[in-house]
Amino acid sequence: MTLMTGDVEPLDLVTIRATVRRALQVRARPPRAAEVREITVTLRKHVRRMLRVARSRAEEVEQGTMAWIQWTALIHRVEDDLDRVAEPGRTAAAMYMDDLGRTCRRLADCLDE
């Protein structure tokens, strides 16, 4: 959400990281389909919100610099993950959740630097 000043609302990285931990936790058995759906939906919301912040950070960096290239590459990776549709089945959905969790973690780490 953009504030009236044009700034982007601060991210709740604690909540985002808690969701990432849920997504990436080692389990004795595959997660239930409902849990995978719920975590994936939450991760997607977090990623979309962080993507807005990442884009604003990339706009502040001089084009062609290493920092700009890194932000642009990260943004494209995140967009690709958001555009990807999980294959049918519980295992494929859980794998997508894991991929999205790792992407979310990476984006949160970069935004927290």
Image: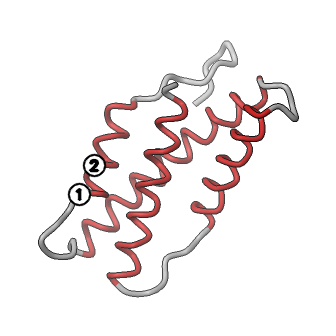
4 with respect to 31 (left or right): right
User: As displayed, is residue 77 above or below residue 85?
Assistant: above
* Residue drawn at point x = 70 percent, y = 36 percent: 55
Can you give x and y, in whole percent of width and height, for residue 46 in the image?
46, 44
Residue drawn at 34 percent across, 82 percent down: 91
What secondary structure is found at the residue carrying circle 1? loop
Q: Which mark is residue 25?
A: 1
Residue 79 drawn at (x, y percent): 65, 56
Question: Eyeballing the image, is 29 above or below 100?
Answer: below
> As rendered, which of 108 and 3 lies closer to the eye?
108
- Which quarter of the rendered picture does the N terminus lie within? top right
Mark 2 and mark 1 residues within 8 Å of each other at the beta carbon = yes
Q: Quadrant of residue 35?
A: bottom left
Image location (x, y in percent) of residue 64: 87, 35
User: At 44% across and 70% down in the image, what residue appears?
Assistant: 96
Quadrant of residue 53 within the rendered picture = top right
Residue ID for mark 2: 21
